Image (cartoon, rainbow, N blue to C red):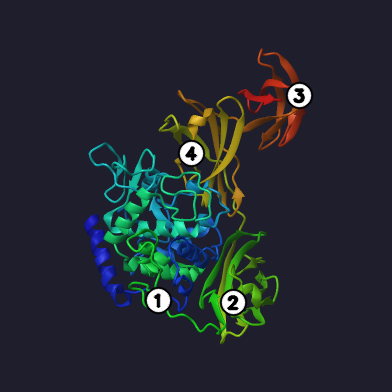
Amino acid sequence: MKIFRTLILSAAASVLAPSATADVPAGYYSSLTGKKEGELKTAIYNRIHNFTLISSYQDLPKYFQRTDVYPDSRRWWDMYSDIPFYAPSFSGLNREHSFPKSWWGGSTTVSAYVDLNHLYPSEMKANTAKSNYPLGMVDMNSSVKFNNGISKVGYPVNGQGGGAAFVFEPDDEYKGDFARTYFYMATCYQDLTWKYTFMVAQNLYPTLTPWAIDLLMKWHRQDPVSQKEIDRNETVYSIQNNRNPFIDCPILAEYLWGNMKGQAYDGSTSGGGTVTPPDQGTPDLVAPTRGMTLEMGQVAEGQTSLTKLYIKGDHLRGKLSLTIYSGDRGMFAIPSGSLDATLANADEGYWLNVTYRPTALGQHESKLVISDGGITGSVSVTLRGECLAVPTLTACTALPASSIESDRYLAEWDTPEGETVDYWIVTRTQYLNGGGVQTEEILSEGSPQEITGFDESERETYSVQSVRLGVRSPMSNVVTVDHTGIRGVEVEEPLVVQGFTGFLRIICSAPQQACEIYDPAGRLVEVVPEVSQNTDIPMCAGIYLVRTSQHPTPVKAVVR
């Protein structure tokens, strides 16, 4: 397989050789000139952190078909394995956050969750093995946890890992790709609060930790920017209107973290062409770019989709005219037909709400034309969406957890064959050490899903739902896991009981009958015929055990 991959890469290089440099828009990086260290990094942040978010996480494979397939082939360009998969099928692959989403807490409202600059297709097993481990060199003198010939996971060499148990080491061919991806993430999201600090610190500069800087700069130098990265960067720019500066201007990394640290950036792109500052008085529409397509995604019949289009200008005057015309224009809407130029000229730019309200099944397309404001001609953005019938989903079957360790385990499940699923939701309930119950929903690419933080719980339960076009399946059965192993796969409806001052609150997905409340001595103190979501039951201070007909396993809660 390695031979086949090498042949494809060689063919790709020959096909793409004529366009070996990035087509950086004139003036795109002009604001960086003369700045150094933290000021330079913040100037890059201001240039790239606002961008047009893609329509939805579930639509990523559609974008990957533009960013991550080999040229003249429909084979997915997977940087994590050597297994051939072919578009448009995404079977066997995951949507991989190369910079782990758990590092910022996993929030789906953070732009990084759908930022194509660090999202790549990945073979499932490699993705699972990678987990949320930092990049690093695997110590080959010790036991290697995972090695598929492209990706390795194992103990880190001395001085690396940042305290993590294991590290992920990509193939030599992609080490520079991942280094420049991490440079981008440490800059574009320098203002985030990090939950895990294996490679990043809570500061605006340098953000990367010393050992991470040493590793990433080494990989950056040893594996220079490839044509793959250049082409991908251009495509991502056409989709979300921002770029990875460390692909366009590789020398920027030296100014921030390398051997030119402390010097003012001189405006050179080091191989990407000279940056030409624009005429300071000339009106210019920086974003969106001409020929861009705004994908509104797939929606179920009767639903709507809201996508934000980023608009940024320099020296625009008066008002911009915004017009939706041609095709299925009646299915797309914007708040107003004009936009004050001062809003687009602002440092943060302007986010335009574009709504897709389909009135019929099928694919729909129209155009949004932006004109006036002093710009020459107009900029046309294609609006595209698809309306599908409301899906019918059946319940998944939650399976016993596997690979149970002191601080983690793998939640597993089966999905009915033949159903199309966008993603899964694992509902995890932690019965915490020292009392208390905590429930969270984890968005998952598919079974198995790694669950971490198990050491905070006495025991846990999980159940699973599949999701298609925003529609959830019925809840699966419930699996209970404790530190001595799997207690059982219980066909129970989920039940969470939270204790507050003076009352208990019931959390359940559907009404449950014969709710019985016991004290620690086993005495029945209260019976409620039926409970449902957010039922509050007044109780005196104390410890209680609660069960229902649908959930006979007692749930402990404390009233204060």
**Residue 328 to residue 426: above or below:** below
Mark 4 — residue? 413
Quick one: label 3 or label 2, which is nearer the N terminus?
A: 2
Disc on the earlier residue, 1 or 3: 1
Looking at the rendered structure, the kind of residue marked 1 is Asp
Residue shown at 72% from the left, 36% from the top: 534
Q: Nearer the viewer, mark 4 or mark 1?
A: 1
Q: Identify residue for label 1.
A: 23
First in sequence: mark 2 or mark 1?
1
Disc 4 to disc 2, C-alpha distance = 43 Å
Kindly identify which residue carries mark 2: 367
On the image, the x and y values in percent for residue 77 come to: 35, 60
* Label 4 vs label 2, nearer the camera: 2
Nearer-N-terminus badge (4/2): 2
Q: CA distance from mark 4 to mark 3?
A: 37 Å
Seen as rendered, the residue at the extreme bottom is: 376
SS at mark 3 in the image: loop
Marks 4/2 in contact by CB < 8 Å: the verdict is no
Mark sitting earlier along the chain (4/1): 1
How far, Cα to Cα, is label 1 from label 3? 68 Å
Give how far apart the Cα atoms at labels 2 and 1 are: 25 Å
Q: Name the amino acid type tagged 3.
A: Met
Residue of label 3 = 539
Secondary structure type for disc 4: strand
- Circle 4: residue type: Trp
